[in-house]
């Protein structure tokens, strides 16, 4: 395992940030969304957004759900009924997304949070068992190695998690995850176990009585309890010990908070691709439907673009397998492959015309900065969209600034809407381009090495007046960037309150397998010491936008965007539509704010 300098608490370091952040690799994505090895927005926790945690992790006191107005209570009842209907149809992804949105609307509602957690467990399990790297890992693990892996996971939780571990709770949640797996036909089929639903339910109920929870009071007793439980289950239904242990690991880790998760080897690889800003694949952003994968966006210069794939196309078959006959995750898996290999796609365009394409997988560079342009030629107001904070982001922003400065830019709008976050170091580096001193962000964790203050350096900086656009999807690293500029009076924040995540995750590879963990290790705070959790960044200029109705949707985020290189000065039709301020009230408000700043400066110099 490669350590991050002298600080091994944050797992693997992939390459370097600037020297002063060398030992601080942090994934502060909101739990969420990544460009995966195929250009698909893969979700390491299995869903589009991590639901806001109104409890202990965020230190927020939720409102009393019983005090809701009658109309909101009716809406809440309808959401729960719709969610239960989706659960009965095993449409876990849509149920998960529905509950996620509802928790944002009704924070602190116990039943919503319970349903969210249950849907997440089901959805993650289905995704794991559509992941060939996970299946290979389980099948190659001996019982002894599986137990050793369980112990390694507990050691990492004990050493790095933001809260002190409760061993009996971790064990209980592992038992719950295993019982849930026994109710999933795909799980049983993977190990050729034939059980009636009644027998599976009975076995699941019996699990909690094998080792009483009260006896699990330490890491050692937890490991002993897992050994006894998995051996008992093997004797009862012939489930391999390695499979049972893996489900107990996943159940335990996923119960810690909405952002902590077990990562399969493929998911860990996808995360590293996100950090590096490139991957081998097709270069498309997809959203699944029951019978197709919908192309949302295509990366400029990617194999998909060169093959003529366009936004709005529907992939209906992959290598001869109809998407309607397999799961969307399985279809996505088929899109993966080594560099230089090909995949055959059957595609329907917007008019329903079918065509077959053969696309060669190559390395695709994912830009973190797009749509670089001058919005107002008279006032010379520049604009770019910052999609995420990856290893290349500070360099990408500097490149964009050089392009705009060559065109005489006098004020700058930075669009963080839909930005799910990324690396803490990248957020600090990027904010440092605009700040001449002072605190950017501080972090606090259970361990003293997590208590840090990141400050801007006094050096040559961009001094353009700034306007920053945010919305409720701007999270984590995006909140660090916007909050630092706001607290230091460096920029005007325009839009709606941001997501309000407020916690940092470390990535920890596991020695025994190619898998890993994402664990919450600390919380972060604004330069003025305010928590972001449950609050977010409050705009200086707040813009009213219409609320979306609570409806089920598949949990692959369609909010994040792709586009051309940082040096591009023109975009596609979708980008042009976004920049039409008459259809974009937040952008319109941001442009007006920037124009006012320029006008005030002009008046002051006369």
Image (cartoon, grey):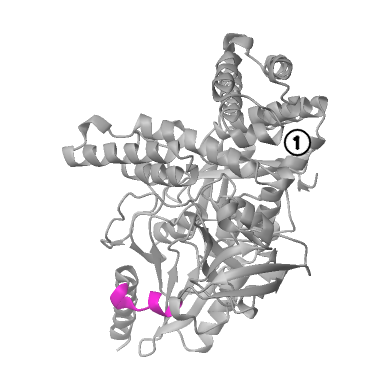
Specify whether residue 428 is in view.
no
Q: Nearer the viewer, residue 167 or 143?
A: 143
Instruction: Answer above or below: position of 373 versus 148.
Output: below
Specify whether residue 496 is in view.
yes
The picture places residue 360, in percent across and down from the top left corner, at 73, 72
Question: Which quadrant of the view contains residue 64?
Answer: top left
Task: Determine the residue positioned at 61% across, 63% down.
Answer: 317
Instruction: Answer above or below: position of 94 versus 173.
Output: below
Q: Residue furthest left?
A: 70
Instruction: Answer above or below: position of 41 versus 94.
Output: below
Task: Determine the residue positioned at 62% across, 13% down.
Answer: 217
The number of discs equals 1
* 445 sits left or right of 497 in the view: right
The picture places residue 374, in percent across and down from the top left corner, at 44, 84
Q: Nearer the viewer, residue 125 or 39?
A: 125
Task: Determine the residue positioned at 64% across, 42% down.
Answer: 128
Instruction: Answer above or below: position of 148 versus 264.
Output: above
Residue that mark 1 sits on: 138
Q: Magenta segment range? A: 575-583
The picture places residue 252, in percent across and down from the top left corner, at 60, 29
Please rate how many residues cluster around mark 1, counting C-alpha atoms within 10 Å: few if below 14, some from 14 to 19, many from 20.
many
Q: Nearer the viewer, residue 148 or 125?
A: 125
Which part of the image, by quadrant, shows the N terminus?
A: top right
Q: Is residue 402 magenta?
A: no
The picture places residue 282, in percent across and down from the top left corner, at 66, 68
**Circle 1 sits in a helix, a strand or a loop, which is it?**
helix
């Amino acid at each position: 395992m490669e350590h991050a300098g002298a600080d091994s608490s944050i797992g693997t370091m992939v390459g370097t940030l600037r020297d002063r952040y060398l030992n601080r690799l942090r994934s502060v994505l909101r739990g969420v969304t990544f460009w995966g090895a195929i250009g698909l927005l893969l979700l390491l926790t299995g869903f589009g957004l991590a639901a806001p945690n109104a409890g202990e992790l965020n230190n927020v006191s939720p409102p009393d759900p019983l005090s809701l107005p009658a109309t909101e209570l009716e809406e809440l009842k309808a959401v729960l009924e719709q969610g239960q209907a989706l659960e009965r149809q095993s449409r876990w992804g849509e149920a998960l997304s529905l509950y996620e949105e509802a928790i944002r609307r009704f924070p602190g509602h116990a039943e919503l949070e319970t349903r969210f957690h249950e849907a997440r467990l089901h959805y993650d399990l289905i995704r794991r068992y559509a992941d060939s790297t996970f299946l290979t890992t389980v099948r190659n693990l001996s019982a002894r190695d599986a137990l050793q892996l369980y112990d390694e996971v507990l050691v990492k939780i004990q050493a790095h998690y933001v809260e002190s571990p409760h061993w009996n709770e971790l064990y209980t949640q592992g038992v719950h995850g295993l019982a849930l797996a026994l109710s999933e036909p795909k799980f049983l089929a993977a190990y050729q176990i034939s059980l009636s639903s009644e027998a599976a339910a009975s076995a699941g109920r019996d699990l909690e009585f094998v080792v009483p929870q009260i006896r699990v009071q330490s890491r050692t007793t937890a490991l002993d309890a897992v050994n006894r439980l998995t051996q008992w289950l093997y004797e009862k239904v012939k489930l391999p010990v390695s499979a049972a242990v893996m489900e107990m690991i996943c159940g335990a880790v996923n119960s810690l908070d909405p952002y902590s998760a077990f990562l399969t080897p493929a998911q860990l690889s996808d995360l590293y691709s996100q950090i590096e800003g490139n991957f081998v694949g097709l270069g498309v952003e997809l959203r699944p439907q029951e019978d197709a994968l919908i192309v949302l966006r295509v990366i400029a210069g990617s194999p998909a673009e060169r093959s003529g794939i366009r936004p709005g196309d529907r992939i209906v078959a992959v290598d001869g397998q109809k998407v309607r006959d397999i799961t969307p995750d399985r279809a996505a898996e088929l899109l993966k492959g080594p560099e230089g290999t090909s995949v055959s796609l059957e595609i329907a365009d917007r008019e329903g015309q079918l065509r077959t394409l053969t696309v060669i997988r190559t390395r695709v560079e994912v830009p973190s900065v797009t749509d670089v342009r001058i919005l107002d030629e008279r006032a010379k107001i520049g604009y770019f969209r910052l999609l995420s904070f990856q290893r290349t982001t500070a360099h990408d922003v500097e490149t964009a600034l050089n392009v705009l400065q060559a065109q005489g830019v006098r004020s700058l709008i930075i669009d963080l809407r839909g930005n799910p976050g990324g690396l803490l170091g990248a957020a600090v580096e990027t904010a440092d381009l605009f700040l001449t001193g002072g605190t950017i962000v501080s972090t606090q964790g259970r361990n003293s090495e997590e208590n840090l203050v990141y400050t801007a350096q006094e050096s040559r900086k961009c001094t353009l007046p700034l306007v920053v656009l945010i919305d409720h999807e701007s999270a984590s690293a995006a909140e660090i960037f916007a909050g630092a500029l706001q607290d230091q009076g460096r920029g005007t924040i325009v839009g709606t309150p941001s997501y309000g995540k407020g916690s940092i995750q470390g990535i920890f590879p596991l020695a025994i397998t190619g898998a890993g963990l994402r664990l919450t290790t600390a919380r972060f705070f604004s330069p003025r010491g305010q928590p972001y959790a449950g609050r977010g960044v409050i705009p200086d200029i707040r813009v009213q936008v219409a609320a979306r109705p609570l409806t089920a949707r598949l949990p692959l985020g369609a909010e994040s965007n792709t586009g051309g290189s940082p040096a591009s000065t023109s975009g596609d039709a979708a980008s042009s539509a976004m920049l039409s301020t008459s259809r974009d009230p937040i952008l319109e408000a941001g442009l007006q704010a920037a124009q006012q700043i320029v006008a005030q400066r002009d008046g002051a110099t006369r």
